[in-house]
Amino acid sequence: MVTGVALGVAVVISVDLANEAASRSFARSSEAVTGRATHRLVGGPGGVPVTLLAELRRTLPGTPSAPVVEGTVRATDLGDIPLRLLGVDPLSEGAFRSHVTGGLLGAPGYERLFVERGAVVAGSFARRYGLAPGDELKVSLGRSESALRVLGVIDDPSGATAGIEDLLLADVGVAQELLGLEGLSRIDLVLEPEQIPRLEASLPPGVRLATASEQGETVGQLTAAFRLNLTALSLLALVVGMFLIYNTVMFSVVQRRPVIATLRALGATGEQVFAMILAEVALAASLGTVLGLALGWALGQGVVRLVTRTINDLYFLVSVTGAPLTLSSTLKGIGLGIGAGVVAAILPGLEAARVQPVAALRASTLEESARRWLPRTAVAGASLAAAGAGVLTAFPASLEASFGGLFGVVLGIALAVPLITVGAMRVAAPLAAAVAGPLGRIAARTVTRGVSRTGVAIAALTVAVSVTIGVSVMIDSFRDTVAGWLDATLRADLFVSAPSPGARRSGTLPADVPGRIAAQPGVAEVETYRAVTVFGEVGEIQLGVTDSRRVRDGALYRLAAGEAATTWRRVWDGAVAVSEPFAFRHALEPGAALGILTDRGPRSFPVAGVFYDYTTERGIVLMSRSTYERHWDDRGVTSVAAYLTPGASREDVAADLRGSLAADGLGVISNRALRESALRVFDRTFAVTQALRALAVLVAFAGVWSALMALQVERTRELATLSAVGVTPGELLRLTLLETGLMGLTAGLIALPTGVVLAVILVEVINVRSFGWTMELQLAPRIFLQALAVSVSAALLAALYPLRRLSRLPVATALRTE
């Protein structure tokens, strides 16, 4: 019982700590960088013109305003770690980030921000890497490396600067030079409500007024589904742990039935017996919860690295150094651990409280009662599964309701497992007898006779193995879908991209690079691509700009208006295509209109079609280069795709390009390498899911082990009698292995269709509602064979200790009743 609670709580707490640490780190860093700003002016691809700052101060004199330049660089001499670069005007910072910069105003060395190429770093960062004012820090954007001098250290003992451990604070001009920007990333403002309409009316085309919290809220919405998925998967481990607790409590009741009967005969009421059992379980669950909190904290330090890596790959750059055990996580662990234990103990406690003293002295009474309840339990399970399916269809827009429906289906099937087990053993008994003789029949009947414990153990193992199947099918389906999509999209031979170390790859190539690549011997044709962030009626938009005149593969489209060629022709004539996640999040269909803020002001673009894309769950809007240049002044290029002439060596052309572009710090990657890199990111993304799946199986293994211990202890006299009448130790070994093997095989066979049901829900419902991605369901035979092998192996391994215990117990001792 302690083990089940500890493992279940540990899995939930570890994921909770990781999610909380990542979210807290992002919130603190956003708060530290945003400061006391209420609003910000943001622009399109070119940012905000520097001249707007002077105009703003003339329009709204006395209104606090501060220019900001943001970007990401890597510290090359510190293990190539990513750092956020924040360029500010020190004279304007007092009204915004004085909690960061205030302690340095007037401090020795701070004035050097105006005259030297350097940056200020956080105290925790400086101590971790042994940096002091005057030291040199090398940073790079791609292969372009620059040296920054450490001009000062931000250190606030009150903790006000928490969240800026990965921040480089530099003068706005230095930041522009390092990032290759002419404009500003934004202008921070502190506005009164009455100033907002006046300012919005005076803004030039292409500039937008946004609240300071808008970006953080957008990112929070994006990561909410990811964090909810992890939390739900971790709760499944706790559900499996509840089965274990139930089994252990039931064993405790069965083992002590004579004691309970004696207490009842001496005058103890049913309520007192019930309270005694609940108190015992609460005490054991409390111990398990304490151990689970400690184990959860230890696991959390590893899980946080997996979660952080996934967030960095998919969403935004965040630096998390640890996952401290917080009060909220502790209270959650206590509530879940003790609550799960008490809930699981209710039915065994009621059984012990209601049984008559004479009946309690007969162990068979419990099994007779359990068998009478099997049909009712199965009907309740079928009703719960049907209710779960109903929730899935009744609330199509709610992700929380989707997980609730999923849990209902899982628990409903689990409740039907004991009745299925009885039926399965009736079928298995003659088959086992044909294979193993009388021992086979005895093994099947033993599983049936102890169904109050074996049924629950098989149910726990079924849930864990079915989750393994469902998650494995989902991951395989997603991976195969992504691999097929990569094959359809990565048609060029080589790709040259601008460096960008952050989660958003949107750097800019030198203007002459596309021409130089096109002139390279062996290159037949080039396509350029531009990735920029713009704003529109739906908020922040990731815009992809391509000059490709090639018709996109028809397999990339769904819901397209007409043929793929027609859709792409409309895009070339001024419409846009939106990715599937973007269409899902903003309820867009072909024929709708999408409003986007351009450098010429707001414009409406018709949606020509929806295309499959798995690069980001926030979605992408695809636009032709000609349309983009009509509405924006930006002429930058983020990447170039090169198609080689027939017979040209991809390796030779790539080597030549790397040599000619080395001075620009650009990367050249082949089709195959880019595909492998994308799949590596995919595998990293699901590493934490794989870990949680393994932990769920571990919890189920503990449940089977507990059930087997209960069976062997309860059957000690029976097995000793068999030994006394001539059954050899080898035959007892075979009998026990047959029993456990039948349990594992039954759990595995039930888990196969259950896993398929879970996979369909995960792929067709949960995944679509979480991320907006459509996947093709892939049912690989190896997944089901592995799951069956895991189920049987777990049951057989769980029998080792009970066998060892039994072999060491003298027959005479085992035959005694006391």
Image: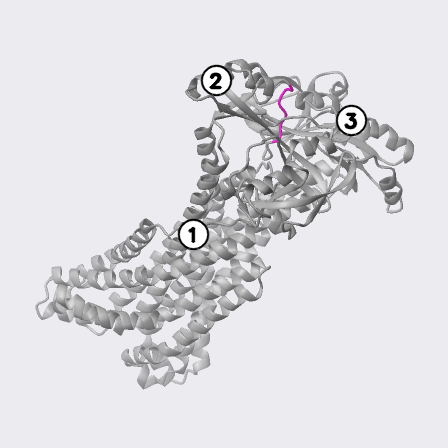
Check contact, mark 2 vs mark 3: CB within 8 A.
no
Total tally of numbered discs in the picture: 3
Residue at x 87% of width, y 30% of height? 55
Q: What residue would you read off at disc 3?
A: 89
The amino acid sitting under disc 3 is Asp
Which comes before the other along the chain, label 1 or label 2? Answer: 2
Q: Is 675 in front, or is 30?
A: 675
Which comes before the other along the chain, label 3 or label 1? Answer: 3
The amino acid sitting under disc 2 is Gly
Q: Is 15 in front, or is 182?
A: 182
Left or right: 757 in relation to 90: left
Q: Is 226 in front, or is 480?
A: 480
Q: Is 400 in front, or is 636?
A: 636
Residue 369 locus on image (x, y percent): 34, 80
Please tell me whether the stretch drawn in magenta is mainly helix, strand or loop: loop
Which element is circle 2 on? loop
Residue 128 locus on image (x, y percent): 57, 28
Residue at x 56% of width, y 54% of height? 769
Q: What residue would you read off at disc 2?
A: 522
The amino acid sitting under disc 1 is Leu
Residue at x 43% of width, y 68% of height? 412
Q: Specify few, some or many for label 2: CA neighbours under 10 Å numbering under 14, 14-19, or 20 or more.
A: many
Task: Using the numbered discs, state the Cα–Cα distance from disc 3 to disc 1 in whole angstroms.
Answer: 54 Å
Q: What residue would you read off at disc 1?
A: 777
Q: Residue furthest left?
A: 726
* Region rendered in magenta: 506-511
